[in-house]
Image (cartoon, helix red, strand yellow):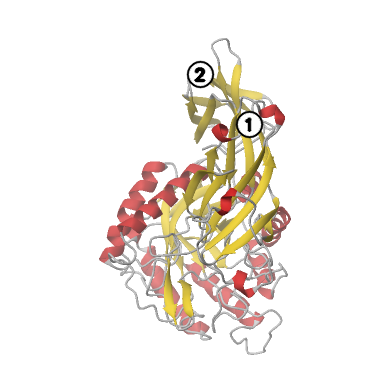
Amino acid sequence: MLRPQDSATRERKRLDGIWSFALDPAGEGRDRRWFAGPLADARDMAVPASFNDIAADPRVRDFFGDVWYQTEVRVPHGWDGRRIVLHFESATHRATVWAGDVEVVSHEGGYTPFEADITAHVHAGDLVRVTLVVNNTLSFQSIPPGVIEETAAGPRQRYWHDFFNYAGIHRSVWLCQTPRVHLTDVTVVTDLDGADGIVEYAVVAGGTAGTRVVLRDQEGRQVAEGNGANGTLTVPNVHRWGPGDGYLYDLEVQLTGEDGTVLDSYHQSVGIRTVKVSGNRFLINGEPFYFTGFGKHEDLAVIGKGHNDAFMVHDFALLKWIGANSFRTSHYPYSEEVLDYADRHGIVIIDETAAVGLNMGLGGGIFGSQGYTTFSPDTVNDATREVHAQAIRELVARDKNHPSVVLWSIANEPESDTEGAEDYFRPLFDLTRELDPSRPVGFVNVMLAPYGKCRVSQFADVLMLNRYYGWYVNTGDLPAAEQAWEEELRGWAGENKPIIITEYGADTYPGLHSIAGEPWTEEYQVAYLDMNHRVFDRIDAVIGEQVWNFADFATTSGIMRVGGNKKGVFTRDRQPKAAAHALRRRWRKGD
């Protein structure tokens, strides 16, 4: 599947805006054919956005089950004889789509794209009714998992990821056209040979046609060309893509007829760089790279996980201001617009699947007692793993050509100290490497599987650790936390693998101060970060630090989460806490 774009042969029409929206608490809409006409008793809903907070209605905010979206779109008159496609960048967590009265596609997974060829069901000039039923229910066979529990007040959705279960159409929807004979996939893998760049390309097309590729620099000058569906291009004196230098070439792929006529044209941006793990070093273009940055969330007031260009640009400006060079897409794939922006600005990304919450041991004060076994025939099982595998396939298929993506993270904080975890994850690591041999693969380890007990880290190229010494353990006792943290970290350092601290942080209420630097104060957050940094600086194998979190974010309600998670160094509306200035001094100390 290729992302919609405008080219010499392609055209797209964005369907974002105000759609009709209706809850379906009884789950009756499919049987009653709600898709066959205008939605009854519908309210307005913005697309893209999470539906939860927009309606100012608690019944909507906490709703789980089927919700319905509907709009109408006019197929442009000029699209006669073309292949016509409905493309959805995401619908969380699953969706079924109708064009008019015809069901055209269903998709599982809330953060990766899907599309439907509707050529047979529409004509140029037609007004087409587009209807989606989106379902946000989580089960042990979804990624992320959850469960419906019966309570005295009725069924309730329970889940184990520490962020609010926002849902809806979070990203743009497109109506697009392509030629009938068209490109269906483009893959690029880059390398370096001295001063020259190497671009290996592979093209897949629907129909029989010739293939020509042209590579151009940012000034539009042709630097290489080739013929055939597979090939290798050499770029003399290449301008490398690198951290802080988001230089991109443009690869135009053309399908050609026997007479040389261009049947289809698609443009793929290319950043020429290498990524490699060597011992306990992470190398980009052969040079050791040290990650500074954050775990982030797609999370905003009112629109939830809906993509917003203005906040995206502002967030990247804050990353530059503070001196961050990277972030992790915790805990799901972000909008591809975000990856495009990172490509252009040289920001490095750890790209993560939505496999968060695969750990029934994470109980206590955050989620309450679980009462479930993580890996069993009745909970996380073989069916779950296949859904997880498909999520990996779709993530790699979508993001494989982004130079900013340097590392795949296939899960966040799963149970990893049991035989069941080892058996579950081994084939998923194998699959990821088969899909993309060019990037390292890892997962994010949690404190419940410390050094010496984790049975999944053996599969990882890079060790990614989430640790909260001084917050969840040794709370308020930073000297004890520092000693315990360094002791564990030195154990991991003996594995001779690069170590990225992918989470460390302390909840901090903005404006709360104390001379003693007590937990929840801005002073404690700064002292907590300083302690962690002293430990990192003493361990040679640590090659990255990503604070949890970039900004405060919404969570499910609970006594540990008053108004959400407050570990951000920025507030939810992006105002800096004292910790932001402290990090800026550390990360930009050479400026």
- Classify residue 480 as left or right of residue 521: left
Lateral position of residue 244 relative to residue 486, left or right: right
How far across and down, in percent of the image, does residue 244 sit?
A: 64, 48
Label 2 crowd bin: few (<14), some (14–19), many (20+), radius 10 Å: many
Spot the residue most to the top. 259
Q: At x 66% / y 64%, what residue is drawn?
A: 300
x and y percent of residue 99 in the render?
A: 58, 43
**Residue 82 position in % (x across, y down):** 61, 27
Mark before the other along the chain sequence, 2 or 1: 1
Which label was assigned to residue 123? 1
* 490, above or below 473, in the image: above
Q: Mark 2 falls on what kind of element?
A: loop
Q: Which residue reaches farthest front? A: 32
Residue 530 vertical placement versus 5 (above, below): below
Q: Disc 2 vs disc 1: which is toward the camera?
A: 1
The type of residue carrying mark 2 is Ala
Residue 144 can be seen, yes or no: yes
Identify the residue under disc 2.
209
Amino acid type for the residue under numbered disc 1: His
Q: Residue at x 73, y 55 (%)?
A: 310
Compared to residue 518, the image places residue 579 above or below, namely above
Give the left or right position of residue 418, taking residue 116 as reference. left
Location of residue 293 in the rendering, given as x and y in whole percent from the top left corner: 59, 61
Q: Is residue 130 left or right of residue 289?
A: right
Is the residue under label 1 in contact with that under label 2 (CB below 8 Å)? no
Taking the spot 59% from the left edge, 20% from the top edge, the residue there is: 263
Q: Foreground: 378 or 200? A: 378
